[in-house]
Image (cartoon, rainbow, N blue to C red):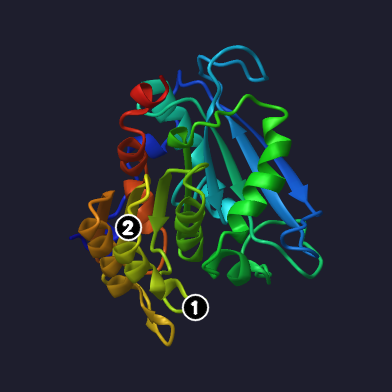
Amino acid sequence: MHAETDYPLGPDSKEHDGIPKGTLTHHTWTDSKVFPGTSRHYSVYVPAQTENADTKSETAPYALMVFQDGHSYLAEKGDFRVPTVFDNLIASGEMPPTVAVLIDPGFTSEMPEKRGWKPRPENRAVEYDTVSGDYAEFLINEILPSIENQYSITQNPELRAIGGSSSGGICAFSVAWFRPDSFRKVLSNIGSFTDIRGGHNYPPMIRKADPKPIRVFLQDGSGDLDNRYGNWPLANQQMAKALAFQDYDYKFVYGDGGHNGKHGGSVFPDALRWLWRDWKQEQR
């Protein structure tokens, strides 16, 4: 337990001389069949330091990690700083050379040029909080093929991860839950496993279903939300207990932070280390 002000970013979240820097490109998607009438921004990070080529080749393919609310994981001065953390951990060999896809929720109105929370994407709750395989289908059949056409990305589900915060966290879990054939590593920060669109049903679903081959990192804090949709700290504790009951490979990091990225950002490098801890064996 730490006071919320005691969640500083460590050295893995800061740029260092001599560390190769990956490339970042920015794109839009306006032709969804799963979520018709939506448009969205997304970005693609490709590592610089790798055993792989940066285009299709006969070398080992890249691992993959997808982030919901991608703009919040990209920010250079934000809590997570994906490009910097990936650069550092890939260079140290603590995670595989990994392509990151950082995708925002869909707008049903005109999509703004600048990414962020204002205006708020109208389709976010539909896409992220609904307990279904729809978002997984959107990723697997719409977004990812265009990226896989450009880069050699593994189809090994053990080397494909997905993460997010709040509603993005439950969304990440849903993708792996419904499509463990494609994603088997989950990072959930302050996940909304509450009754927004049925997410409170996950703990009993986990307890009653045969275990799935997924690895789950959960993070939350005692100061998280408590409102008409539920209590976030309790919901995440219920998730952890359900995963433990079914003997899942999981880790739950619980502090006293609120509904923000401070705690999640401070443990982000260690969360990635834990998720990818045996990537060299999984690559074989």
User: Observer-nearest residue: 284 or 7?
Assistant: 284
On the image, the x and y values in percent for residue 32 come to 77, 56
- Label drawn at residue 196: 1
Residue 115, x across and y down, in percent: 67, 56
Q: Furthest residue to the left?
A: 1
Which amino acid lies under the numbered mark 2 shown in the image of this protein? Gln
Q: Is residue 261 above or below residue 80?
A: below
Tag 2 residue = 219
* Vertical comparison of 134 with 150: above or below: below
145 horizontally vs 196: left or right: right
Quarter-of-image position of residue 262: bottom left
Q: Which numbered mark, 2 or 1, is in the foreground of this view?
A: 1
| Label 1: element kind | loop
Quarter location, residue 210: bottom left
| Residue 115 vertical placement versus 109 (above, below) | above
Residue 194 image-quadrant placement: bottom left
Mark pair 2, 1: CA separation: 19 Å
Q: What amino acid is found at the position of numbered circle 1 in the picture?
A: Ile
Q: Residue furthest top?
A: 58
Quarter the C terminus occupies: top left
User: Left of 63 or right of it: where is 230?
Assistant: left
